[in-house]
Image: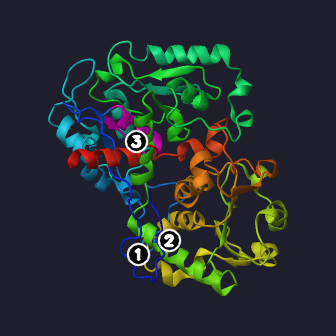
């Protein structure tokens, strides 16, 4: 769990606290190595699938990322996942998780001939005989590498809008049959309308329920399972390329028969796929400054509220690109007049917010240049997210994955801040547009389509179930 302490100054060195132990066994180290190379910067799905398969994760080369184009002297503009997330700490805490770079993979396995052509058995050569592909995007010069990886082995064309990957509690032939049978029983006995979000409100499935009950919670409209079959397991490399439609949240993609493995995987994402200290600390300094502003503005507890207002390049502008006066009308019931409000936004024209400024004391990231210090300008969006995640109330943009991740981080925090949230996953988060979606995330709902349009409590609710008992048992064993 990553939490903000009450940072009393701006000279912050470590602003996150990892409060949970390595509480369940990691996947065993694969022998010989099995690889899952990533050819582009992914969402969490591909990382989670590689972990579930017990494979070595091959990081994509450094590349440009959509909308991150700042080029001042402090702003690197090609990135690997390690620029954003703390992957270097993963191997130290989890002996069964191995992560290497694309360059290391090509040098150790392709150039040496350890991995050969899957059909001819001939020795392979990396495209252009090159092993360093940093700075070459898959859509441009890096396309040769992408095609090479696709031809190297099996490329599962899983469409997770139609199926979900299942991982049985035990390995071996036929072990997934029981899960396939459970799926058949669910589809034949439980009507669709009785297992999707609108029908399942404030009635969460316990995280330690049977596999069948937990499957009902995540099934949605899907009628198939994606099987990690013998053919895939016997391949030294499994490559999830851009053709695989892995568009949804990681917790909707992989299903674990063992609920403890399910919780371990979600904790792994929570505790490790988090922003680096540079981003965390910059955000923590601004959060501390915002709390001081709130106290100055009359809130003795230092509470402030937050918005994410998406205005720029966005597919769903018709539904969400509304004027500030309408944003106020749609959200005024959630906030207190004259309260302190932080707005994360890509809007450049600050006069746009004048109708909101008439009702609230507004602050933006640009008001905290001293707290930010020297930082890569390409990280500012992520700093905005972390600040917005700490509001007492948050109002965001439906359909926006930027808002979605803010809500998931708020969900993680809610498990510390509110005992009730542990049961239901509820939080004080709302949407200003579309208006009919205003309340869909303030309480528990099972997943429903489109999954990607918002996050769901199944991703953060009660993830630490059983840890205290486990720790106490280990203490007793050690005595």
- 3 or 1: mark nearer the eye: 3
Q: From the viewer's perspective, is residue 215 above or below residue 135? A: above
Which residue appears at 40% of the width and 69% of the height? 278
Which residue appears at 69% of the width and 55% of the height? 397
Is residue 100 in sight in this rendering? Answer: no
Q: Is residue 37 magenta?
A: yes
Between 140 and 182, the one lying in front of the other is 182
Measuring from the top left, give residue 23's x and y in whole percent: 34, 46
What is the C-alpha distance between the residues marked 3 and 1? 40 Å
Q: From the viewer's perspective, is residue 9 above or below residue 441? A: below
Which residue has dot 2 on it? 283
SS at badge 2? helix
SS at badge 1? loop
Which residue has dot 3 on it? 264
Residue 312 appears in which quarter of the rendering?
Answer: bottom right
- 3 or 2: mark nearer the eye: 3
- Magenta range is 36-53
Q: Is residue 443 magenta?
A: no
Which residue has dot 1 on it? 73
């Amino acid at each position: 769990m990553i939490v903000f302490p009450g940072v009393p100054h701006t000279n912050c060195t470590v602003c996150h606290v990892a409060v949970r132990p390595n509480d369940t066994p990691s996947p065993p180290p694969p022998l010989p190595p099995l690889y899952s190379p990533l050819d582009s910067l992914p969402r969490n799905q591909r990382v989670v699938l590689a972990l579930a398969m017990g494979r070595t994760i091959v990081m994509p080369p450094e590349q440009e990322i959509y909308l991150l184009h700042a080029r001042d002297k402090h702003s690197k503009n090609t990135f690997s996942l390690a620029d954003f997330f703390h992957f270097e700490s993963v191997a130290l805490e989890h002996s069964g998780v191995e992560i290497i770079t694309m360059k290391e993979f090509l040098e150790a396995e392709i150039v040496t001939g350890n991995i050969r052509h899957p059909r001819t058995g001939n020795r392979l050569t990396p495209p252009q005989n090159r092993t360093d592909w940093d700075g070459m995007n898959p859509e441009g010069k890096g396309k040769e590498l992408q095609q090479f990886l696709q031809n190297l082995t099996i490329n599962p064309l899983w469409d997770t809008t139609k199926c979900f990957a299942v991982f049985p509690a035990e390995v071996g032939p036929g072990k997934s049959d029981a899960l396939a049978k459970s799926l058949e029983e669910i589809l034949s006995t439980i009507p669709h309308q009785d297992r999707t979000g609108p029908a399942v409100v404030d009635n969460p499935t316990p995280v330690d329920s049977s596999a069948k009950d937990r499957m009902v919670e995540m099934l949605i409209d899907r009628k198939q399972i994606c099987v990690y079959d013998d053919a895939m397991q016997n391949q030294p490399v499994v490559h999830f390329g851009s053709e695989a439609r892995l568009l949804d949240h990681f917790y909707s993609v992989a299903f674990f028969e063992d609920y403890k493995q399910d919780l371990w995987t979600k904790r792994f994402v929570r505790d490790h796929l988090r922003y680096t200290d540079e981003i965390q600390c910059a955000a923590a300094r601004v959060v501390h400054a915002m709390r001081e502003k709130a106290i100055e503005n009359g809130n003795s507890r230092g509470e402030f509220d937050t918005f994410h207002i998406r205005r720029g390049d966005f597919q769903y502008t018709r539904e969400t690109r509304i004027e500030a006066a309408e944003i106020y009308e749609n959200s005024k019931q959630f906030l207190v007049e004259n309260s302190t409000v932080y707005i994360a936004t890509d809007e450049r024209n600050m006069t746009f917010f004048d109708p909101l400024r008439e009702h609230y004391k507004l602050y933006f990231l640009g008001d905290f240049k001293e707290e930010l210090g020297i930082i890569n300008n390409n990280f500012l969006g992520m700093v905005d997210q972390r600040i917005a995640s700490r509001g007492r109330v948050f109002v965001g943009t439906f359909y926006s994955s930027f808002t979605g991740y803010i809500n998931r981080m708020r969900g993680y925090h809610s498990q510390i801040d509110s005992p009730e949230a542990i049961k239901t996953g509820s939080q004080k988060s709302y949407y200003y547009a579309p208006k009919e979606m205003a309340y869909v995330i303030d309480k528990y709902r099972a997943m429903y389509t489109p999954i990607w349009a918002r996050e769901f409590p199944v991703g953060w609710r009660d993830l630490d179930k059983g840890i205290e008992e486990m720790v106490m048992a280990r203490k007793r064993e050690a005595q």
